[in-house]
Image: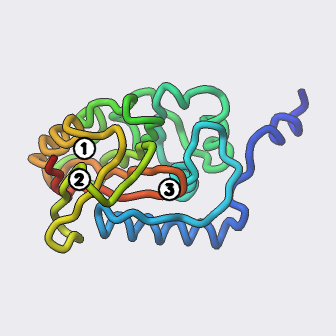
């Protein structure tokens, strides 16, 4: 197989790189500033199998040659690592704690939250942002969210994530300002969970 054939096997990035990148970044900021609010993205990219559009779009925007990506086991075949190395120049790491960004293919692959980098008191921003793909996001039932960006409280549910994540999230909350930030994605929809958000089940 020639180099041209190898490159042609890699899916394309954003159909409209400037517009799509700006749009996805704005939606990501919106999601993080309003925890639990489900937002949709409107962009096109030829992603590898197994990736939700919102997850792939977030990584295309957030990754670059200075960021390190950890992938859950189900995503470590040739297609996903090759795609993001080609389009973003990112480095891949083996251990969760080494990652700036982490992509989890499904809730049952989510490692213990404490295994990710949580930053330090001097540099709390040196933590992992975790993206978790789920089957469905809903603004009804499941969790009750409270904290900055939430007027009073809001209901939220992500299929497959329940008491275990809420318990580990509370444990990390004791480390504030250290901690992790999380995006939950389903198809082209996403919701943000910054470390300031409190989760009750």
Q: Closest to the observer: 30 or 155?
A: 155
Circle 1 residues within 10 Å: few <14, some 14–19, many ≥20? many
Res 154 → quadrant = bottom left
Q: Split into 4 quadrants, where in the image is the N terminus?
A: top right
Q: Residues within 10 Å of mark 2 (few under 14, many from 20)?
A: some
Residue 108 percent coordinates (x, y)? 37, 29
Residue at which label 1 appears = 118
- Rendered image quadrant of residue 94: top left
Labelled disc at residue 62: 3
Q: Gap in Å between the C-alphas at discs 3 and 2?
A: 18 Å
Rendering coords of residue 40 (x, y %) = 50, 64
Q: Nearer the viewer, mark 3 or mark 2?
A: 3
- The mark nearer the N terminus, 3 or 1, is 3
Q: Which comes sooner in the sequence, label 3 or label 2?
A: 3
| CA–CA distance in space, label 2 to label 1 | 7 Å
Q: Does residue 164 lie above or below 130 as drawn?
A: above
How many numbered badges does the structure rendering display? 3
- Mark-to-mark CA distance, 3 and 1: 18 Å
The residue located at (40%, 39%) in the rendering is: 99
Colour convention of the picture: rainbow
How many C-alpha atoms fall within 10 Å of the one at disc 3: few (<14), some, or many (≥20)?
some
Name the residue at the front extreme.
141
Give the quadrant of residue 117: top left
Q: Are marks 3 and 2 in contact (CB under 8 Å)?
A: no
Tag 2 near tag 1, CB within 8 Å: yes
Foreground residue among 30 and 39:
39
| Position of residue 33 measured from the top left corner of the image (x, y, whole percent) | 31, 69
**Residue 124, disc:** 2
Residue 109, position as x, y percentages in the image: 39, 29
Describe the element under mark 3 as helix, strand or loop: helix
């Amino acid at each position: 197989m020639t180099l041209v054939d190898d490159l042609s096997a890699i899916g394309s990035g954003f159909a409209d790189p400037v517009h799509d990148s700006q749009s996805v970044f704005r939606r990501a900021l919106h999601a993080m500033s309003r925890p639990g609010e489900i937002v949709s993205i409107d962009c096109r990219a030829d992603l590898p199998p197994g990736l939700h559009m919102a997850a792939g779009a977030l990584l295309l925007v957030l990754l670059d040659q200075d960021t390190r990506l950890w992938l859950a086991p189900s995503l470590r075949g040739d297609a996903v690592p090759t795609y993001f190395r080609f389009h973003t120049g990112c480095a891949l790491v083996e251990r969760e704690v080494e990652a700036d960004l982490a992509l989890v293919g499904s809730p049952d692959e989510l490692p213990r939250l404490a295994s990710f980098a949580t930053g330090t008191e001097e540099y709390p921003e040196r933590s992992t942002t975790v993206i978790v793909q789920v089957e469905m996001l809903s603004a009804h039932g499941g969790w009750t969210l409270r904290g900055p960006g939430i007027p009073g409280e809001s209901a939220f549910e992500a299929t497959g994530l329940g008491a275990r994540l809420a318990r580990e999230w509370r444990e990390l909350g004791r480390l504030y300002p250290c901690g992790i930030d999380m995006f939950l994605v389903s198809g082209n929809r996403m919701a943000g969970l910054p470390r300031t958000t409190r989760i009750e089940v």
